[in-house]
Every structure is written in structure tokens, then in C-alpha cells.
Image (cartoon, helix red, strand yellow):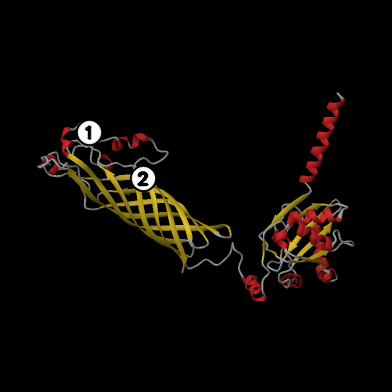
Amino acid sequence: MKSIKALLMFLFVFVATMAATVSASDIFFNSKWTLWENADILIWTNDKELAIDPREFCLSLRRNNMAIGEPKCRTLGEWERDTIAARYANWLSNNIEPGLSSNYLKARHPSMSAKIQELEDKIVLYIADKGNVLQIAIFDETSSEPRAAGTVQKKADKIALGDDIASTFFDRKTSRRLSKEERQKKLTEPDEYYKEVPNVRAWGGFSVGYAQAQVPLTPYNWYHRHVESEIRNYRITRDSVSLWNFIDDSTPLFTLYAGAIWYGFIGGEIFYRYSNHVVKTDKRDTIYNELDHWEFGQHEIGLNVMFSTTFSPIKLMDIHLFGFLGFQYSFYSEDIAVKKDVEYPSKAYKARIKFEDVYKGALFGGGSQFVFAKHYGFSIRTGISSRGKSVYTEPSPDAGVEPTIIGAMTVDWFINFGLEYHWDL
């Protein structure tokens, strides 16, 4: 019994210790601020006594982030002696709390804002003693509002406290210190989420995909007449409404395309698509004993109107979501031949089914382009396309030996995966 109590006590202490460790720090927000190699860290406080030792804190930075090089740490005495900075520090101490955005904590006094912008590539570490915890905020020259804020658990051991602050707020990649010219350029760069949109974003690409008559999530009985039909005697099928009554609907797609978006919103795209469709002959019909192969190449050219919006989840990648609506013209090239030992094909072979010279159609859908380093991307898109005759009349039963022209309305679903190259104009 005593051993069980001892075990429970050990587990309680262990869990309590872990909970204290997990809750030792709390980050309220942390933007993509730059940690420089060989950084100058200026420690700023309104407290009578500084919670950490600057020299020991530099050692903590090096222990927790070897890439930081040889940082220099000192107290920011010039701000501590400045009345406006002291008032702003006191206001921060009373207002930093979970749930607040960084914009709420922005320095709005022109003099204070100017002090922050004059930091060049130095980093200000603000510390405020709140009893059991220390409030922390990070400032640099790129913004008048804190780039990061949160709390760490207060400790009597200043070395351990410095380690906590370093591991919580300074555990990130470092960058080379900038020259004066580079700093000026960075200072004038717009925020990445509000950067200027290029007048024209253009691209070209090649994609492979797949098409089928059945649109996903729709009833199969809408399509089974078309996809299960077969041609008898080179021309007879259930009806002549859809091309899928005659040729296989499920096929790979190959597409070449080029397009452009104006002002990040509206644009256009031209494309050429090719797919090959085998004719669906009835294997029980002995007339096909003479046939070697029979298929149609489907060539389509068209134009899409596109509507787009852009997101930048990481610095080197842009995601362009888009929808499109367009039209296309479809042409069919027949590839048919009888077996080599057949000298004279049958009459049915010569009077076989024929397609229109051109079919008109529409297409719509959506997708996304993933672009890396502004130029190299891949895309995925899906949609529905159609093709049909402008004027449709039922084929005459007296057509006899004359070829029957078919294809009033043909619809399919497609999905494409493409590789692209992008550029701005």
C-alpha cells in the first residue's frame, strides 16, 4: 500500500512539474521578424531592477541558437531616460495580454515611432515584471508595433530566465546583417500581404489529365445509356445524341495552354487539348471481323475567361485560386483500317458513321496554381465541358447508305495536373 502511495505521489509531482514546464511561457503573437547574425540586442524596461543580466543573456542566446554568432547585449538606457519612451513602456505593461493584435499595441506618438524606425538593424527586447511572470515584446525598425509578444515564468535564477526568453523568442533562423543601403530598401518595402500587385501575371504550361462522361457525385443512370452503348454494323446505336454512344468516354487528356491575369483579378487563357477515343464496336457483330482498328483523335481549341485571387502562406510560394468559364471548338480525326488480308471492305465500312467537321461547346470549372520563387509552378484544375451541333435534327430512317451525322450534345467531367512557368509584366 505504501509503495502505491509513493508511486501516486511521484506521478503527481511529475505531472505538476511537466505542467509547470509547459506553461512556463506563452506567446501571444509572433510575426516573421528578422533575427540578425551577430545581433545587437537592446534590453528595455521601466522596472527598477532588470530581470536578466545582459552579458548572461548573450550567452543564453548563443546556447539556444548557434547560428546567431556573436551577439551584443546592453540595456537601452537612452529610452529608459526618455519621458515619451517611459510613458509608452508603462502603457505596454498595462495592455499586453492574450488575444490582442499587434496593431493595438502600436506606438502612435510620432516621436516614439521615429525612435523605433531609427533602430536600423538592432533588436529591442522589452521586459516588464508582472509578479509571477515577465511580459516580453520584440521591436525592430520595420514596424512601430511589436513584432512578437508574450510572457515567460519568472525565476530567481537569471541565467535560467535568460535561457527561457532565448528559447521562446529567439529560436529562429538568422539572416546576414544588412548594409545601410540594404536597410533602406527593406524599410521601404511594403508588407508582403499588401505588396503591389503586378499589372499582368502570365504563364504557359503543359498538363496531363483524365476525362469521363460521368460527373462525380451524380447518378450513374444519367450516363449509362451513353457509356454502355456499342455500335453495330458501323452505324447503328441506341441514339445519336451523344458522341459517347459511339466512342469511349474515359480517356487521358493532354493540354498546352497559356494565359494571363490582369491586376490579380481577371484574365484569359487559350488552350489546345488532345485525347484519343476508341470506337465502341459490338464484338458480337461478325462484320467487324474485317476491322483492324477504329478510333478518333479529339482536338480542341478554346478560350477561357478567368477570375483569380492570390494568397501567400509562405515567402517563396504564392497560391492563385481561380475559376474559369469558356468556349471551345472540337475537331475529330478518324483513324480506321481493315486487316491486311481484307482486299475489299464491306459496304457498311464505306457507309459508316461520320462526325461533324466541328462541334461547339462550353466549359467551366476551377482550380489552383502553386507558384514557387515567382516563376515555377504546378496547377490542378477540374471542370465540366460540352460539345454539340449548332442545329440538331433526328437522322432520317431513310438515310440508308448515306452516313449519319451525330453528336447533338456531349458532356464530360475532366481533371488536369500541369507544370507551368510564370512571369510578371
User: Label 2 belongs to which residue?
Assistant: 211
- Mark 2 and mark 1 in contact (Cβ < 8 Å)? no
Number of on-image labels: 2
Residue at coordinates 76% horizontally, 65% vertically from top-left?
71
Nearest the viewer among 105 and 345 is 345
- 245 vs 377: above or below: above
Q: CA distance from mark 1 to mark 2?
A: 24 Å
Residue 233: percent from left, percent from top: 16, 37
Amino acid of disc 2:
Ala
Residue 169: percent from left, percent from top: 74, 56
Q: Residue furthest bottom?
A: 181
User: Mark 1, mark 2: which one is toward the viewer?
Assistant: 1
Residue 152's disc is none
Residue 201: percent from left, percent from top: 46, 64
Side of 113 where 199 appears, left or right = left
Q: For the residue carrying disc 1, how many other residues have a C-alpha within 10 Å: few (<14), some (14-19), or many (20+)?
A: few
Return the disc, 1 or 2, that comes first in the chain's sequence. 2
Amino acid of disc 1:
Lys
Nearest the viewer among 180 and 184 is 180
Could you say whether the residue bearing mark 2 is in a helix, strand or loop?
strand
Residue 224: percent from left, percent from top: 32, 35
Side of 62 where 289 appears, left or right = left
Q: For the residue carrying disc 2, how many other residues have a C-alpha within 10 Å: few (<14), some (14-19), or many (20+)?
A: many
Nearest the viewer among 54 and 273 is 54
Could you say whether the residue bearing mark 1 is in a helix, strand or loop?
loop
**Quadrant in the picture for residue 251:** top left
Asked whether residue 118 is in view, the answer is yes
Residue at coordinates 81% horizontally, 56% vertically from top-left?
162
User: Label 1 belongs to which residue?
Assistant: 283
